[in-house]
Image (cartoon, rainbow, N blue to C red):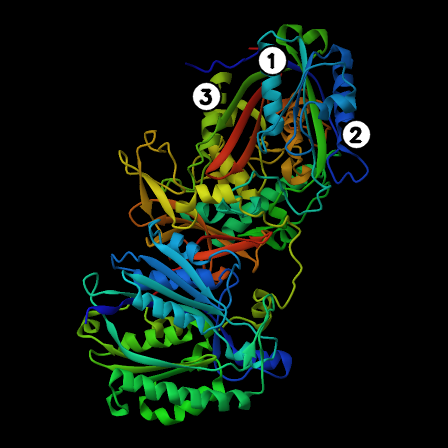
Amino acid sequence: MGRGIIAYGAYVPYWRLDRSKITAAMGSGGGRGHRAVASYDEDTTTMGVEAARNALRGSDIVPDSVLFSTANPAYMDKTNASAIHAALDLPQSSWAVDAGGAPRSSEAIWALAAANRGTNLAVASDLRTGRPTSGDEAGGGDGAAAFVFGDDAVSPVLCEWLGGAVATAEFTDRYRQPGDAYSRIWEERFGEQVYLPLANDAIERAMADAGVGLDGIDKIAIVGLHARAVRGLSRVAGDKLVPDLTGEIGNTGTAHAAIVLAAVLDDAAPGETILLVHLADGATADVLRTTDAIADHAPYAPVRAQIDRGNDALDYNKFLTWRGFLDREPPRRPDPERPGAPPAFRSEDWKYAFVGSRDRSSGAIHLPPMRVSMEGGAVDDMERVRMADVPATIATFTVDRLAFSLSPPMVAVVIDYDGGGRFQAEMTDVDPDEVRIGDRVEMTFRRLYSAEGIHNYFWKARPAAG
Amino acid sequence: MSSHGIRDKVAIVGMGCTQFGEHWDRSVDDMLTDAAHDAYASAGVTQDDIDAFWLGTMGSGVSGLTLSKPLQLDYKPVTRLENMCATGSEAFRNAAYAVASGAYDMVMAIGVEKLKDSGYSGLTGARPPSDGTDSTITAPATFSLLAPAYAHKYGLDEDTMKEVLTRIAWKNHRNGSLNPRAQFRKEVAKETIAGSPLIAGPLGIFDCSGVSDGSAAAVLVRAEDAHKYCDNPLYIKALSFASGPATGALDSTYDYTTFREVVASATEAYKQAGITDPRSQIAMAEVHDCFTPTELVLMEDLGFAERGLGWKEAMAGTFDLDGDLPVNPDGGLKSFGHPIGASGLRMLFECWLQLRGQAPPERQIPSVTEQGKTLGLTHNLGGQPGAAVSFVSVVGSELG
């Protein structure tokens, strides 16, 4: 078979909230385990970029489309996938389109990515909120995953689709009106009893479509925001059931099926058959099988490693602040200014793709790009040089306790890139007391701040993984 | 192509300087009026004698009208200019050139800034629309980058570095305690300085210059006319300005322990003034101590201390009021705050007092009265490490 998943990657943000901190602060809510928390400078778009970078790292795959799905879009009425497209430095000829709304929308981008000709990048991302002490607050999680569907000729297929089926029904389980900060849910037992027959129906038909019986299935992944229904369905899966990761990172909604599948593929052997069941306003079941090529595949950022790297030092009050549920006194400094649309458009390569310029004669790298070389003064003799994936070392740094920040203090570093080039960057995902000259860092795509309705996306440095 | 300087061609014959501070009761117009009329009185001239004006302000007004309206000038030329934190010095430099060119007989350089009306901490300024990728860290943060870099390069541990920075703040506050024009007129204990709340990196609130309002002005004439107005004028020996290519944040060879712009402007100024050993030849220096590590690095960039030894000289008291080379005898930005357009002229005002022996006895520097040195230096810096503009002047009480 010539078509399937040729690359994938997940992104689990660095921060974790220990659910017991909710209970400790509020006297109710919370629970055991952790949820993954998008930092103050992350949204579904930036997490989508990180997942896509993890998917594409080390390959020369150039997607013909970026299909993006989230239930928590950074923008309405403006495409978010185009920012991901820009951050990945993809050509103008690639399509970028959103499929938004409910977590079920993620199925649309998978289907489209698989069915449309060419190489298609499907990115699912979500940032889950909930009212303080709610089940959604503790049980939700933030993250993203990206899957590239394409032909074997482009890159070896790692996993094929054998068949699938859907079951659809209209019922009110969870719901959120546009502009609301959180979802509401109906009584849990109602949803459970609606979901279970739908799921059983979809699973039965999916296996028939794939021509596989239950004994031919090696692993079963059951994913959905309705925890009770997932638990109910999981009972019949037995020891084929794979962990759904919700205890460690929470349920990442739109992204969760993709993150769980990525975790399964990270450890999969050739020829494994996987049943993936997605409960979201109905049920969808897919049967997939890994190929021989997966034996040679070394994921750039395995899901397990990202989960294990998490930092649960995050305090509950900071979590509430980051999500906008606590309004803190700002510093006595001017509010940040919105980026201008024309300047941002002119510098798309720099702002979104982190592309600088390299003087062809001296080799000097300029960040941001310049027309006149700082070495030798050559004019307009530059080539573009993308620095997003180049590691760097801290030359000097400071902790700015006066600057406006959504999570003060702001950490600023001057970094020298391996192979040349220097930049003064903001640093993120770091304890201000732990920054040292000589530390290794890598770049990450973030939302610096939002002003007057415009999100200001740009790159920051973070401690190098590993 | 060459820079020639205007050594001994232009003289200061009068100066005025307001008290610096939180002037809730005084407007920009009030401060300009006070500084200008103090300078007229100092020179023994009237407003009608001034042929043209150079007004430096960063954000307290635009156009010459900012000056001509409050002073009710009689259709005279007013140039309003800005060059970041070196704005006041830049007004002085351009005014001096106008006299040296022969275009005018008598001009005024005046600077003003009203910072306290904004309601914000630190300095703020409007920026043109951007792509949103420019650094948004504050001024103390940009200058605090110097501290770990300097300590790392020269092997100072964190505690020693903090002691050095603390002593610089302590020295400048001590000098300011003797100056009635200063914003802060109290000595501050080293423990208070070292224990003050952190603002950026290792810098506490007492490592930062204050935020204040103020104005200062100078009256300039050709050197040969100076004695018509003044028995003991100050002669301009050197004026230099360096605007850098701003590559510090791009160029890995820049190590954040120097301001290349300061080295360039100091080298040029010493050439113009014929100074070969600034440490021994200069009686005093007013330098841009916006933050304590700035003053430390400036001591080396201006040639007052060997590279890597500035911290030892600072600790040894070399730059104290009674040291070999008093630095910021008036208290500096540390005690005066930094009303941007005014600071460069405020520095010259201290040279005006000290080199002419008119400083109050409690802070008159012995390098002038006992050692007979005649030269003073002012240094003004704008921007941040790696992307700065730097001004250096040398003035002297003797011709030749």
Label 3 crowding class (10 Å Cα cut-off): few <14, some 14-19, many 20+?
A: few
Q: Quadrant of residue A130?
A: bottom right
| Three-letter amino acid code of the residue under disc 1 | Ala
Label 1 to label 2: alpha-carbon separation:
27 Å
Report the residue marked by disc 3.
Answer: B276
Query: Outermost residue, right direction?
Result: B25
Whole-percent x and y of residue A236?
37, 94
Instruction: In the rendered structure, find residue B89 and report the number of the disc placed on it.
Output: none
**Quadrant location of the N terminus of chain A in the rendered image:** bottom left
| Three-letter amino acid code of the residue under disc 2 | Asp
- On screen, residue A310 versus residue B26, left or right, reads left
Label 1 to label 3: alpha-carbon separation:
28 Å
**Quadrant location of the C terminus of chain A in the rendered image:** bottom left
Report the residue marked by disc 2.
Answer: B30
Report the residue marked by disc 1.
Answer: B98
Could you tell me if residue A287 is visible in this image?
A: no
Disc 3 + disc 2, Cβ < 8 Å: no
Front residue of B19 and A414: A414
| Residue A394 drawn above or below residue A237 | above
Q: Between disc 3 and disc 2, whose residue precedes?
A: 2
Does dot 1 land on a helix, a strand or a loop?
A: helix
Label 1 crowding class (10 Å Cα cut-off): few <14, some 14-19, many 20+?
A: many
| Residue B340 drawn above or below residue B204 | above
- On screen, residue B119 versus residue A317, left or right, reads right
Q: Which chain carries label 2?
A: B
| Three-letter amino acid code of the residue under disc 3 | Thr
